[in-house]
Amino acid sequence: MTSSGAPSRKALSKIATNRLQKELVEWQMNPPTGFKHKVTDNLQRWIIEVIGAPGTLYANDTYQLQVDFPEHYPMESPQVIFLHPAPMHPHIYSNGHICLDILYDSWSPAMTVSSICISILSMLSSSTEKQRPPDNDRYVKNCKNGRSPKETRWWFHDDKV
């Protein structure tokens, strides 16, 4: 693993490559509101700019998501983290890890990068306070050496924020 938290990656399968190329074309034609894909030549890692929705605590705030796609995407979920600085949110750790069930246990191959982004923006938009998770310091300390959030056994207990 690298210090950025990127898993050691194998090349994308043909299915994953075809799927991501299709998603990228769809994104370019109809990007989700509040998001901009930063174009690079790396299909396996996308950097996405997130703009906070109007009328929310995060209105006009700008953040960056890093999406790393595994060899067997979409059968396996991508790793999605916020780059520094991560938004202050009860489900987002200061190291950028996101506690959101669709990124882990509730992943479905029918989901797309766009649907992930919309879910993350919805999570941000519904928050009533900007604060870190109560266990932020302990969690971040235990995630040293670039541990992937996909290695975490998440406990999804709060769907109010």
Image: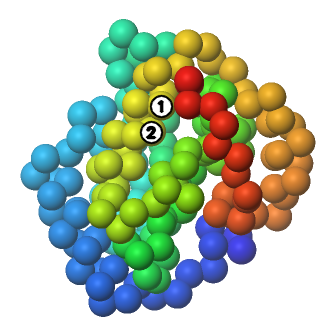
Q: Which quarter of the rendering shows the C terminus?
A: top right
Could you say which quadrant of the image residue 9 lies in? bottom right
Taking the spot 37% from the left edge, 72% from the top edge, the residue there is 74
Q: Is residue 5 visible?
A: no
Looking at the image, residue 138 lies above or below residue 47? above
- Which residue was labeled with disc 2? 120
Count neighbours of disc 2 (C-alpha within 10 A) and say few if under 14, some if 14 to 19, many if 20 or more. some
Q: Amino acid at mark 1?
A: Met
Q: Position of residue 18 (x, y in %)?
A: 23, 80
* Residue 123: numbered disc: 1
**Residue closer to the observer: 146 or 109:** 109
Question: How far is disc 1 from disc 2 in space, using C-alphas?
Answer: 5 Å
Can I make out residue 90 in this image?
Answer: yes
- Residue depicted at x 37% and y 88%: 13
Q: Is residue 49 above or below residue 34?
A: below
Q: Give x and y (percent) for residue 52.
A: 40, 25
Closer to the camera in the image, 91 or 156:
156
Question: Is disc 1 in contact with disc 2, using a CB cutoff of under 8 Å?
Answer: yes
Residue 134, how many percent across, how many down? Answer: 80, 28
Horizontally, residue 99 falls left or right of residue 108, namely right
In x, y percent, where is residue 94? 72, 38
Left or right of 79? Residue 125 is: left
Q: Amino acid at mark 2?
A: Ile
